[in-house]
Image (cartoon, helix red, strand yellow):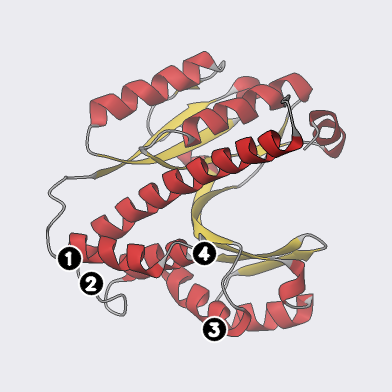
Amino acid sequence: MSGHSKFKNIMHRKGAQDAKRAKMFTKIGRELVVAARNGDDPVFNPALRAAVALAKAANMPKDRIDRAIRRGAGGEDGTVYEEISYEGYGPGGVALIVDALTDNRNRTAAEVRSTFGKHGGALAESGSVAFQFSKVGVISYPAAAADSDTMFEAALEAGAQDVESSASGHEITTAVEDFAAVSEALEAKFGAPESAGLTWQPHNTVEVDEEKARNLINLIDALEDSDDVRSVASNLEIPDDVMEKLGA
């Protein structure tokens, strides 16, 4: 990145981060509105519990969370959203699942199809990719939150399926139906996580070379930039030496 001063560079990065945060809050707000239509009490509404856990993990302001829940529960937001998943392949045969929440199926489908095409990928038939994944909840904590034994014991007691700890942090995997309860139990013990949400976990991964990895990263970034896209999952695995070349 070039610029006339360090200050301008910092401000440019801050602006990009602020824009990304605003987009993320908009997407989470949509999740809260949709979930709250089935009840505004997270205790009796698992979908709302999961959405609130996601919002807290993203450090979304409490008043914004509350407003979104009120809009959904009170029917103030008349927009009808539809949950839809798109399956496709990127360069190197890497499988991708794109989860979206949209009020216009045709618009979103056209945008996703165009994004795949621009980055050397293509949409696939429904069911041709999903069988390679399982839907799970994933909660991430920094390594400093606890030692591996403490995190493992707490996650196991809370009902998690698996815990992977390394120098970079802890990743806790849960069944979809247990995600909210495990999130709440761990937050009570360790504070808010770095991230938390439902995702597709691949059964196997595919390694790619530097060029394909770069194209895939650009494809995933472009998909995630869409207002309608909730998340993008893939079975991409980038070898350490390729990561170094990419500067990641």
Residue 63 is situated, as x and y percent measured from the top left of the image, at: 34, 68
Q: Residues within 10 Å of mark 2 (few under 14, many from 20)?
A: many
Quarter occupied by the N terminus: top right
Mark closest to the chain's N terminus, 1 or 4: 4
In contact (CB < 8 Å): disc 1 and disc 2: yes
The CA span between labels 1 and 2 is: 6 Å
What is the three-letter code of the residue carrying label 3?
Ala
Mark closest to the chain's N terminus, 1 or 2: 2
According to the image, label 2 marks what residue?
40
The quarter of the picture where residue 102 lies is top left
Mark closest to the chain's N terminus, 3 or 2: 2
Q: Residues within 10 Å of mark 1 (few under 14, many from 20)?
A: many
Mark closest to the chain's N terminus, 4 or 2: 2
The CA span between labels 1 and 4 is: 22 Å
What is the three-letter code of the residue carrying label 1?
Ala
Residue 11 is situated, as x and y percent measured from the top left of the image, at: 62, 40
**Mark 2 falls on what kind of element?**
loop
According to the image, label 1 marks what residue?
73
Residue 212 is situated, as x and y percent measured from the top left of the image, at: 70, 21
According to the image, label 4 marks what residue?
57
**Mark 3 falls on what kind of element?**
helix
The quarter of the picture where residue 86 lies is top left
What is the three-letter code of the residue carrying label 4?
Ala
Image mark for residue 188: 3
Mark closest to the chain's N terminus, 3 or 1: 1
